[in-house]
Image (spheres, rainbow, N blue to C red):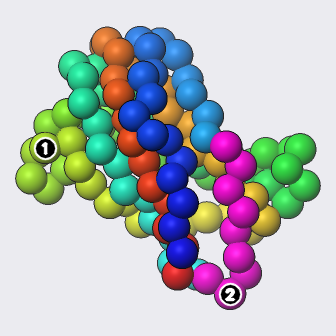
Amino acid sequence: MWCQAFKAITVANGETEVSRDIMLYDHMDVHAFEYTITGSGTLDISVETSISGVNWIDNGIKASGVGATSGPSSDGNDIVPLSLKPGDVLRIKCTASGDNVIVSMYFTQK
């Protein structure tokens, strides 16, 4: 099961973009996100979880300083596995530095 967290959005230098709330399902225990990045800046990607959708718990930075030359093929594409604190809802935060970044991202759970 997957969903799109970001679709070719621009994250301005020094700004943070937050995905929509993504429902988590108890019976699925493998979580990951896949990103595609273009632009000359870099991103720090972090994840938050919540039970209520009101109080958010930081799960830490899951990818730091990723950019257009990141990933195993140095092409701005990668899949990052996640270890998450318990919750019913997840959201992904992307913070740009150095310059603007365009990001598309999918989240999956299996």
Residue 42 sits above or below residue 66 on the image: above
For label 2, the crowd category at 10 Å Cα-Cα, with few meaning under 14, some 14 to 19 and many 20 or more, is few
**What residue span does the magenta drawing correspond to?**
20-28
Mark number displayed over residue 27: 2
Chief SS of the magenta region? loop
Please provide percent x and percent y for residue 26.
73, 81
Amino acid type indicated by mark 2: His
Residue at 35% x, 15% y is 100
Judge left or right: residue 52 versus residue 70.
Answer: right
Please provide percent x and percent y for residue 33.
44, 58
Mark number displayed over residue 109: none
Q: Nearer the viewer, residue 60 or 82?
A: 82
Residue at 14% x, 56% y is 72
Q: Residue furthest bottom?
A: 27
Query: What kind of element bears circle 1?
Result: loop
Determine the image quadrant of residue 12.
Answer: top left
Mark number displayed over residue 75: 1
Query: What kind of element bears circle 2?
Result: loop
Residue 21: say if magenta: yes
Residue 49: say if magenta: no
For label 1, the crowd category at 10 Å Cα-Cα, with few meaning under 14, some 14 to 19 and many 20 or more, is some
Judge left or right: residue 36 versus residue 3.
Answer: left
Residue at 21% x, 42% y is 76
**Reading the chain from its start, which is encountered first: label 2 or label 1?**
2
Mark 2–mark 1 Cα distance, whole angstroms, equals: 33 Å
Instruction: Answer yes or no: is residue 82 visible.
Output: no
Instruction: Answer yes or no: is residue 26 visible.
Output: yes
Residue at 71% x, 49% y is 21
Amino acid type indicated by mark 1: Asp
Q: Residue furthest left?
A: 73
Quadrant where the N terminus sits is bottom right
Please provide percent x and percent y for residue 105.
42, 48
